[in-house]
Amino acid sequence: MEANSNNKEIMMNNSEIKPIKNPYLIETKVEEDFFLLTNPCISDGFKIININQHAILEKIDNQRTIADIANLTNYTEAEIKQVCDILSEKEIVNYTNAFRIPEKSNKVKSLALWVHTTNNCCLRCSYCYIPTLGQNDYLSENNIKIFCNKLIQSAKVNQLNNISLRLSGGEPLLKFDLWKSYLVSLKQELKDLGCELQLAFLTNAVLITDEIIDFIIENSCGIGVSMDGLSEYQDNTRHFKDGTGSFSIVSKNILRLKERKCNPSIMTVVSNKNLDGLIDFTQYIIENSLRCRFSLVKQEPINITKTIDTLTRCYELFDKAIDNGYNFTKRHTFGDLKFGTPSIQTCSNALNAAALYSDGSIYFCHRLFGDDTPQGTIFEDNDLLEIFQRKTYYFDHNPDCQKCPYFYICMGGCPLNRINNKDAHCEIYQAVIPQYLKLLGKKRLINIKKKN
């Protein structure tokens, strides 16, 4: 009898519980009977639910008890509590109205640097933002040594477990011979400290050689290749000094990288110049099983209506590709939008990341090279992390942004691209995010069905 009394008490307590819905919850219909629920405030805050579970979720208004919801549906209180418990695992609902939101962490265990190895470049891209492009200055051998020592010092002081370097420019492969031995030594010295070094070359891919490919493989480097389209669409934006296009060389070198299992990530700047070719280019990405990142041009105006229409058609191609096994969620990203990786800001700059210029100066962002006062240098005694955190541009958001359901995915966009504290491409993000979430949900649903 005592056990039965306890059960009755538990049932009574359950019936009086008021489930609370997360105010940042995003609901996306994936198929007729399935939905993706997204809590953008926690890591991997995704949950696929069926139409019956969704019917219960719809009745949660932050006022009704479980008993109230049972009276409005054909489900028992136990069934409703079970669904609420499942949703609480991802903080989609809870019983206390105390939902987590991203907060700044004082426990920094990693550093990331954009490294401007040289101002020199073999191409002259139409929208390049580097004001000193084409000058022959570069990070000298002596300064590379100072930089490496600075990284080792920072790893020791902060007990870092990861450092990420994106070697860029200009064209970083112009200085490959200068850097290669230092990168190998740095990797080993950091490893001895318990710190992993992750390297990536951000390149136009016209200088790829077998030696470079061997180095990438042997040192587990990433490689991002700038490519804006097929044929004339690449040639119109990414061409040599004399106007000759780069497509024929770049496309061949991408195949070379793929044949050697280097798996390049294609970095595409979406602009008015390549919109007409973006759909065919997306098909090329899919057919070659490439990873790709679409970013919106920052230095030029863009036709918003046409961009939304074009991207919608590109995502329709990705939708069909998912049916044929294309791993969309691991092969496609869109700018700095954060799906499943919440943060207090768009990127990590001024938290644990910054950009190193070719003269040894450290900037908040590589887009400020030559246009802004650096916040430090590698030649001072201060720790890198302390230098990184001297300056930030981030925390003035338009009130409309803070009301937006996508706020913790977009975070107001790039602060250097804001007009009246709102990203200039806000309307495009508003159109892209639900399409991206639908495809993310579709991929997850396929995986669930395979397991079952």
Image (cartoon, rainbow, N blue to C red):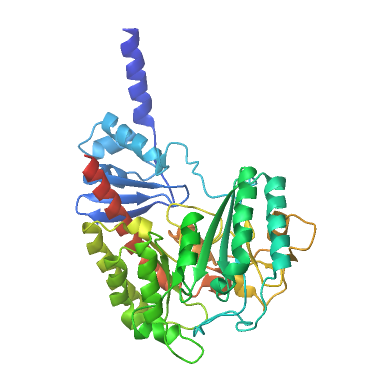
Q: Position of residue 39 (x, y in %)?
A: 42, 49
Q: Which is nearer the eye, 134 or 366?
A: 134
User: Who is closer to the viewer here, 100 or 334?
Assistant: 334
- In percent of width and height, residue 44 lies at 42, 47
Residue 300, compared with residue 227, is above or below; it is below
Q: Position of residue 118 (x, y in %)?
A: 62, 74
Does residue 256 appear in this view?
A: yes
Looking at the image, which residue is at 70% across and 46% down? 156
Q: Residue at 63% across / 63% down in the picture? A: 354
The answer to which quarter of the image holds residue 244 is bottom left
Residue at far top of view: 1
Q: How many marks?
A: 0
Image side of residue 365 versus residue 145, left or right: left
Q: Residue lying farthest right?
A: 381
Compared with 269, 224 (above or below) is above
Residue 159 appears left or right of 305: right
Q: Say if residue 105 shows up in the picture.
A: no
Q: Is residue 369 above or below residue 87?
A: below
Residue 32: image x %, image y %?
A: 19, 54
The residue sitting at 28% across, 58% down in the picture is 326
Residue at horizontal 36%, vertical 60%?
A: 331
Depth check: 87 or 186 in front?
A: 186
Farthest residue, direction front? 211
Q: Quadrant of the N terminus?
A: top left
